Image (cartoon, helix red, strand yellow):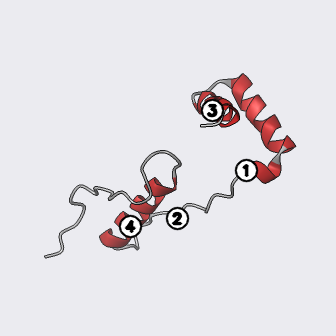
Amino acid sequence: MPLLEAFVNKIVHQAVAGDARARGDLIRLTNAHPAAVRHQEPLRIIDKTMSAQEAAAIYAETLRAIPGLIDSGDEVDLGGIWDDR
């Protein structure tokens, strides 16, 4: 990982953890270099009108959208949310 990327990742983690100074640094970096910020797809909201399968698929999609949480090709274990019987 390039040093600059490691530096930015550290600031992001500190900001998410509640460090106000890191949050300010992150906002300044984002404002100074808006083209460097990757566009994130809006997250879909699960609601009562969805089937269990659709809700589970959206949940798995949301987990895959979080950078570094899981590899995009990995199977997401939904823990038996529904039966295909």
- Pinpoint residue 21: horizontal percent, then vertical percent: 73, 23
In the displayed structure image, the side of residue 4 where residue 61 appears, left or right: left
Label 2 CA crowd tier, 10 Å (few <14, some 14–19, many 20+): few
Check whether the beta carbons of the residues at disc 4 and disc 2 lie within 8 A of each other.
no
User: Which numbered disc, 4 or 2, marks the residue that appears first in the sequence?
Assistant: 2
Which numbered tag is attached to residue 6?
3
Q: Which residue is mark 1?
A: 37
Query: Which numbered mark, 1 or 2, is in the foreground of this view?
Result: 1
Q: Quadrant of the N terminus?
A: top right
Which numbered tag is attached to residue 57?
4
User: Which numbered disc, 1 or 4, marks the residue that appears first in the sequence?
Assistant: 1
Residue at x 43%, y 65% (from the top left corner): 58
Label 3 CA crowd tier, 10 Å (few <14, some 14–19, many 20+): few
Q: Quadrant of the C terminus?
A: bottom left
Residue at x 74%, y 35% (from the top left corner): 26
- Pinpoint residue 12: horizontal percent, then vertical percent: 64, 34
Residue type beneath disc 1: Val
Q: Name the secondary structure under disc 1.
A: loop
Q: Name the secondary structure under disc 4.
A: helix
Residue at x 51%, y 56% (from the top left corner): 65
